[in-house]
Amino acid sequence: MNCCLQTRVSPHRGRLWPGYLALAAVVATFGPPAASMADPLRVPDAFEACASCHSYEQDEPAQEGPPLWGVVGRRVASAEGFDYSQALKALGGTWDRARLDQFLKDPKAMAPGTLMNLGGVSNASERAVVLDFLERLSAEQPAAVAGD
Ligand code: HEC
């Protein structure tokens, strides 16, 4: 009895493997791109310090800092209802990637007197991760980018 059960079970197990492999191949092919498209708000570690002062989801209110949804392509110091410093208002123009990079590297050097109490992100690759994240938020909101 025991011997017969085993011989019936083992070929069955053998047949399952190709199925798992095929499933793994499908997940490997379609999994990662689908996941990154479907989850634009995945917050990178490098952004966590920012999130303690800034909201980043659409229509979220300002916290200690202005909301960052749509900030790439937005006029500097233009989030409605936020009380910016004169230092930030005086910068003028629009936030593009290069200016954001400069600001994040050393906020107080670019805007002396800014209310943003952050020493700066000295690591260029960390800034790049944060900027990629901010750009993806903006890509979801083309009207703000076009508003320039
Ligand atoms: C301690 C709180 C605090 C932290 C941490 C912080 N910010 Fe800010 N941020 C502010 C404040 C306050 C302002 C408004 C500055 C002003 O008016 O001078 C600001 C302004 C900004 C602006 C200008 C937005 C606009 O509407 O013109 C950007 C961009 C920005 N922060 C990005 C970041 C990023 C990215 C990080 C993380 C690397 C970060 N901030 C971390 C408080 C903070």
Image (cartoon, grey):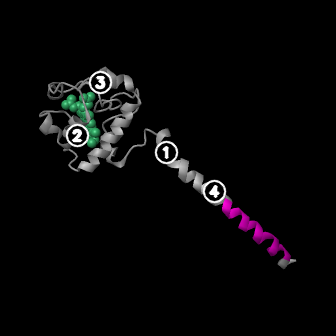
Ligand 1 is within 8 Å of the C-beta of the residue at disc 3: yes
Q: Main secondary structure of the magenta part?
A: helix
Q: Mark 1 against mark 2, which lies toward the viewer?
A: 1
Can you identify the residue that label 4 sits on? 22
**Looking at the rendering, in which quadrant would you find the N terminus?**
bottom right
Using the image as rendered, state which of residue 119 and residue 127 is in the foreground: 127
Secondary element at image label 1: helix
Which residue does the image show at 30% across and 30% down from the upper left? 71
Can you identify the residue that label 1 sits on? 33
Which residue does the image show at 50% across and 48% down from the upper left? 32
Secondary element at image label 4: helix
Q: Mark 4 against mark 2, which lies toward the viewer?
A: 4
Ligand 1 is within 8 Å of the C-beta of the residue at disc 2: no
Query: Quick check: which quadrant has ligand 1?
Result: top left
CA separation in Å, label 4 and label 2 = 44 Å
Secondary element at image label 2: helix
CA separation in Å, label 3 and label 1 = 32 Å
Can you identify the residue that label 3 sits on? 79
Q: Mark 2 against mark 3, which lies toward the viewer?
A: 2
For marks 2 and 3, the one nearer the N-term is 3
Residue 94 seen in render: yes
For marks 4 and 2, the one nearer the N-term is 4
Which residue does the image show at 29% across and 29% down from the upper left? 66
In the rendered image, residue 90, in percent from the top left (x then y), is placed at: 14, 25
Q: Mark 3 against mark 4, which lies toward the viewer?
A: 4
